Image (tube, grey):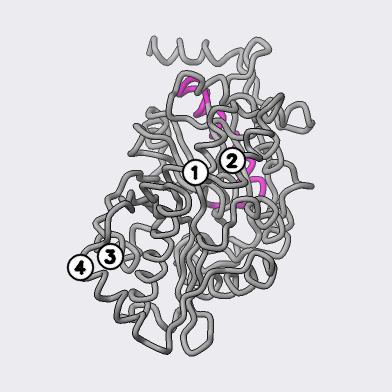
């Protein structure tokens, strides 16, 4: 009883406000820089890019979504943050695939203490109820294509580009607030300095002897055409996956602007069968290795360092954020063969042209047995686990 009274007294001077101004959005972005300043494995995002993601005019996701950010203040000092959002496209997805009618989301959560976090979570849930939502899912920050899930294993090394990091205690805070795990996302660590197991090499050789198969590099000079091919395969390959929401033209445009500087022809492959594109694999140099020392700012000389790095990046790690094979080939030997061929060709380029020694594959859904089997066959191991939680409102 005494602890409960103390907690109530501790929250008596807490104020939670809805973010409405540019200054508040900047403060929203700045908070993690203070909370994680002593965490050697947190990678400070570029503040301009992070601000763009929460600014409706700069993020195509807002063309089909509505979001509200909240900040918690105590004595004029910001002590927590959270976002609540409703994705109208997610509401149209089949409920069996995770989203569907009545499912709202929250994310971008950080707080100094558990009681502050719970107060913020209640505020986000209240906002979702006001939007007619009946279930809350999170953390999803903010689109499923950005940083879904809470890190629950793998705190001992930094995340790769477009993957999240979190404090160890957040898991307990969320679970004690009544949330249960609805889905787990895995990333796999793969040593790319040595050849793959003999069975994989035999599968690749067989594919190379098959005149029906062509695995080619993308042509960055035809960026929009190549992106359209990849998007068509992606929307087909992932359409029945948990959490799938189709990418819209405004989002595709934004992703293209964001990723084009780190797109390299030999790191993205399209597989063709009888002349028809049927599979793709995207690999990105780990930009986090370049931006980690910049502490979120390109000034005064960070921009020059980053431009120099982008001309010919040398990295330890490559990340494979997306791979897809058209539905008609999934669960077939051909699908695995095409995947192994693309992985091998990109492995060679990563080592020979960029000096990489490891790759991170994922995220991969816990029930995606095809991709998990491919990773296991390559002797890859799970290095990070992310939980997505939900509860009834």
Rendered location of residue 385, percent (x, y): 35, 45
Label pair 4/3, CB-CB below 8 angstroms:
no
3 or 1: mark nearer the eye: 1
Q: Is residue 76 above or below residue 83?
A: above
Mark 1 and 2 residues: CB-CB less than 8 Å, in contact? Answer: yes
Q: Which residue lies under the disc numbered 2?
A: 309
Please give the label number shown on residue 198: 4
The nearer-to-camera label among 3 and 2 is 2
Q: Nearer the viewer, mark 4 or mark 3?
A: 4
Element carrying mark 1 = loop
Is residue 376 shown left or right of residue 386?
left
Q: Quadrant of residue 343?
A: bottom left
Residue drawn at x 31%, y 80% is: 333
Find numbered disc 4 in the image and state the secondary structure of the residue it sits on. Answer: helix
Residue 314, numbered label: 1
For label 3, the residue is 373
- Examine the rendering and report whether any part of residue 182 can be seen: no
The residue nearer to you, when weighing 115 against 61, is: 61
Residue at disc 3, secondary structure: helix
Sequence-first tag of 1 and 2: 2
Magenta segment = 111-134
Few, some or many residues within 10 Å of mark 1 (<14, 14–19, 20+):
some
Query: Mark 1 or mark 3, which is nearer the start of the sequence?
Result: 1
Label 4: few (<14), some (14–19) or many (≥20) C-alpha neighbours in 10 Å = few
Q: CA distance from mark 1 to mark 2?
A: 7 Å
In contact (CB < 8 Å): disc 3 and disc 2? no
Q: Reply above or below: 368 against 79.
A: below
Q: Are marks 3 and 1 in contact (CB under 8 Å)?
A: no
Residue 125 falls within the magenta-colored stretch: yes
- For marks 4 and 1, give the one nearer the viewer: 1
Position of residue 152 measured from the top left corner of the image (x, y, whole percent): 36, 38
């Amino acid at each position: 009883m005494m602890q409960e009274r103390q907690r109530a007294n501790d929250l008596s001077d807490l104020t939670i406000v809805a973010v409405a101004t540019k200054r508040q959005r900047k403060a929203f972005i700045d908070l993690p820089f203070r909370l994680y300043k002593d965490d050697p494995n947190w990678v400070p995002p570029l503040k301009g890019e992070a601000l763009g993601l929460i600014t409706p005019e700069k993020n195509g996701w807002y063309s089909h979504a509505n979001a509200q950010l909240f900040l918690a203040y105590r004595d004029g000092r910001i002590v927590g943050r959270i976002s609540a959002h409703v994705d109208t496209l997610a509401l149209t997805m089949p409920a069996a695939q995770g989203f569907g009618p009545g499912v709202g989301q929250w994310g971008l959560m950080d707080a100094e203490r558990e009681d502050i976090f719970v107060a913020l979570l209640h505020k986000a849930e209240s906002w979702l109820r006001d939007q007619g939502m009946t279930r809350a899912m999170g953390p999803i920050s903010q689109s499923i294509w950005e940083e879904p899930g809470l890190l629950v294993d793998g705190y001992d090394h930094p995340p790769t580009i477009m993957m999240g990091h979190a404090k160890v205690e957040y898991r307990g805070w969320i679970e004690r607030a009544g949330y249960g795990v609805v889905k787990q996302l895995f990333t796999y660590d793969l040593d790319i300095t040595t050849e793959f197991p003999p069975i994989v090499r035999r599968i690749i050789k067989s594919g190379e002897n098959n005149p029906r198969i062509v695995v080619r590099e993308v042509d960055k000079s035809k960026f929009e055409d190549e992106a359209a091919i990849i998007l068509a395969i992606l929307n087909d390959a992932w359409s029945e996956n948990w959490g799938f929401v189709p990418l819209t033209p405004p989002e595709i445009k934004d992703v293209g602007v964001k990723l084009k500087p780190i797109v390299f022809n030999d790191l993205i492959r399209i597989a063709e069968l009888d002349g028809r594109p049927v599979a793709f694999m995207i690999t990105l140099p780990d930009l986090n290795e370049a931006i980690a020392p910049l502490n979120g700012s390109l000034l005064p000389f960070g921009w020059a360092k980053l431009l120099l790095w982008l001309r010919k990046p040398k990295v330890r790690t490559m990340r494979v954020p997306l791979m897809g094979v058209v539905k008609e080939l999934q669960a077939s030997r051909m699908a695995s063969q095409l995947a192994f061929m693309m992985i091998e060709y990109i492995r060679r380029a990563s080592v020979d042209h960029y000096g990489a020694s490891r790759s991170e594959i994922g995220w991969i859904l816990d029930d995606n047995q095809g991709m998990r089997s491919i990773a296991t066959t390559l002797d890859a191991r799970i290095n990070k686990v992310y939980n997505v939680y939900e509860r009834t409102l």
